[in-house]
Amino acid sequence: MFQRILVANRGEIALRVIRACKELGIEVVAVYSQADRDAPYLQLADRAICIGKAPSADSYLNIPRLIAAAEVADVQAIHPGYGFLSENPQFAEICRSCNFEFIGPPHEAIRKMGLKTEAKQIAAAAKVACVPGSEGAVVSEAEALGLARSIGFPVLIKAAAGGGGKGMRVCRDEANLASALQMARNEAAAAFKNSSIYLEKFIDHPRHVEVQILADSHGNVLHCWDRDCSLQRRHQKLVEEATAPTLPLEVRSEIGQAAVRLARTVGYVNAGTCEFLVDADNRFYFIEVNARIQVEHPVTEMVTGIDLVQQQIRIAAGEPLSYRQEDIVTRGHAIECRINSEDPDNDFRPSPGRITALRIPGGPGARWDSHAQVGYTVPPNYDSLLGKLIVHAATRLEAIARMRRALDELVVEGVKTTIPLHRKTFRNKDFIDGRVDTTWVERVLIPRPN
């Protein structure tokens, strides 16, 4: 096992990794930008090193500075968390070339799964169904038009080298195809320095279901069942559940097996997530792999009892998985709400500032994962995630009632938050009945004015 690990991230996930390391008896080195110099979680690390100014390019995205910090601190491994450099194959390769174990998959797997066109080809080789669409990047307008006619409108235009909704356009007819292609290419080039795009069939009102996988370096691959992440706004997740409601047991088994086949085919090692769209007939289609720990990993931890971050560290240290597939069963239901410092009443405008009051929910089955405390100043430079409120109960309806109670207990003052939106969600009959999809938030909960 490692003696010392560097956490190449900030905020909630940095604190989560620190806690996992402490329980494993591992010393932990935190890094921070000047904007985060007063972050309370830094006091829990064995050492904290400043790596630059507030902009991410000068700090959390600056590979030479992170490697220098790792060398100064004499660590054996680097945990990238999520976001920033967590899915950057160059960073993973540099870490290992500098004799630091990267706590994540091999850089070859990250590179292959990071290009969605190549990921779809790997999925096809693993006999995992994909959304009908182009085999690779679409080069010309004529090629795009021919493909769109063959699979049928509407079609979805997507960036080949990224995610998060950037470079993504729905095109419903031929008349708008040329302009949609150009806008998608422009967005992709700006966001990912790669203007390649591809087309696939647009599935109306799908659910977003993902499968948590674990794979060690000894050839063992297994899944930790599924999560539903359908509640989204502009492709950004708001609420996640484990396991996916309304998904039949046989489909849950099939989608888990598909994720395992895909991981084996690509030579995946460590924790990761295979993401799928599920249509109204419960047919599922592979869309992408997130080659890192996910923001929503706690709901899987709650229903399986498996500490996924500790598993990441153990796998990176060369240990074999201590579980067999039949050992992993789910108990009860878990739900997570992402609490962001945003103003839902003003188009989710970021709301940086100083937290003047904070009341954290307690009681049975409630968990609060957050780096925020009273007096903490939310900087304007980074993602707006303040914390994650997670509940666990015997049934989904009991978990919903528990989340309603916990949301009513939760108080954050000094900044605007998404708490009011979540309170509204958990009192909505569509959500309670499980009748939601990836478009539901913007169609029903917060429809845009005409």
Image (cartoon, rainbow, N blue to C red):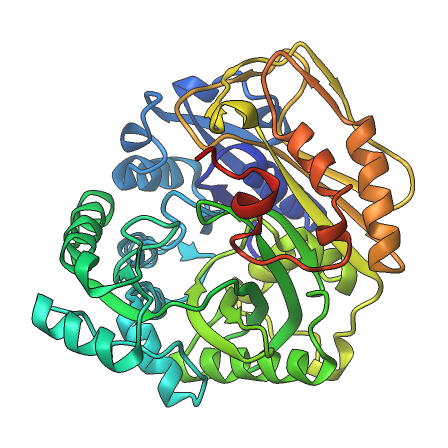
Left of 339 or right of it: where is 332? right
What percent of the width, then of the height, locates residue 412? Answer: 69, 20
Residue 220 or 28: which is nearer the viewer? Answer: 220
Frontmost residue, 200 versus 148: 148
Depth check: 427 or 409 in front? 427
- Going 35% across and 79% down the picture, which residue do you hit? 132
Where residue 386 appears, as percent x and y from the top left, is 59, 30
Above or below, comparing residue 439 to residue 306 in the picture: above
Residue 268's place in the image compared with 21, above or below, is: below
The reply, left or right, for residue 45 in relation to residue 146 is right
Quadrant into which the C terminus falls = top left
Residue 444 falls left or right of residue 364: left
Up/down of 178 relative to 285, above or below:
above
Q: Is residue 259 above or below residue 292?
A: below
Who's the residue at 51% across and 36% down the image? 29
Q: Residue at x 65, y 82 (%)?
A: 251
Residue 323 in the image: x percent, y percent? 71, 76
Is residue 341 visible in this depiction of the protein? no
Q: Report the number of numbered marks.
A: 0
Left or right of residue 428, residue 317 in this image = left
Residue 421 visible at all: yes
Q: Position of residue 345 (x, y in %)?
A: 55, 24
Residue at point 53%, 83% (across, down)? 258
- Quarter that holds the N terminus: bottom right
Residue farthest to the front? Answer: 450
